[in-house]
Amino acid sequence: MNVIRIALIVLVVLTAGLLLRGQGARHQAVRRLGLVAFALLAVAAVIFPDATTVVANWIGVGRGADLLLYVLLVAFFGYVAGRYFHDKRQNRHLTALARRLTLAQAPPPRGLLPPKGQTEGPASGKTSQT
């Protein structure tokens, strides 16, 4: 098995593992550091395009363009998985809010209302009509 295959498998597993973890401050920091590292590597690839071919040959990929494609596939997978989990969490939250709002605005059940012709109780000072 090539080094690139192992590296891609490890990157995919690590990306999935990071995305499955919680959304605390540490997780946000790791995501931001990853984004900064990705941006720096992208700028370096633009400034030194031959470097991608050298790195690609070193890890067992034929061309630098293929290496960039593989890296972008991993990044895209991470983005799609992240959006999926974010949307899933947001949908659960919106569903809970909609349920609370519906229950807060719902009229009381009919069985709890006093029958017609009767008062609300002795505290109102009225008597029931029979």
Image (cartoon, rainbow, N blue to C red):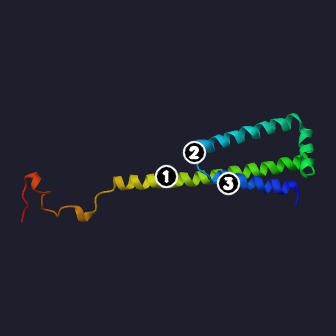
- Pick whichever, 65 or 20, lies toward us: 20
* Extreme residue toward the top, this view: 47
Position of 23 with respect to 59 (left or right) is left
Task: State left or right for residue 28 relative to residue 10.
Answer: left
- What residue type is disc 1 on? Leu
Q: Position of residue 65 (x, y in %)?
A: 88, 47
Work out how far the residue at label 3 is from the one at label 1, CA to CA, in angstroms: 26 Å
Q: Quadrant of the N terminus?
A: bottom right
Residue 9 located left or right of residue 62? left
- For the residues marked 1 and 2, what is the alpha-carbon distance in whole angstroms? 20 Å
Say which mark, if any, is on residue 94: 1
First in residue order: circle 2 vs circle 3: 3
Tag 2: residue type? Gly
- The kind of secondary structure element at disc 3 is helix
Query: Of helix, strand and loop, which one carries label 1?
Result: helix
The answer to whether residue 120 is left or right of residue 76 is: left
Q: Position of residue 118 (x, y in %)?
A: 12, 61
Q: Residue at x 55, y 53 (%)?
A: 89
- Which amino acid lies under the numbered mark 3 shown in the image of this protein? Gly
Q: Which mark is residue 110?
A: none
Q: Quote the CA–CA distance across marks 2 and 3.
A: 15 Å
- Could you tell me which quadrant the C terminus lies in? bottom left
Q: What residue is at 33 percent from the left and 56 percent from the top?
A: 106
Residue labelled with disc 2:
24
Q: State the image quarter where residue 33 is shown.
A: top right
Element class at badge 2:
loop
At 42% from the left edge and 56% from the top edge, which residue is drawn?
99
17, 90: nearer the viewer: 17
Q: Residues within 10 Å of mark 1 (few under 14, many from 20)?
A: few
Instruction: Return the residue at label 3.
Output: 17
Q: Position of residue 124 (x, y in %)?
A: 11, 52
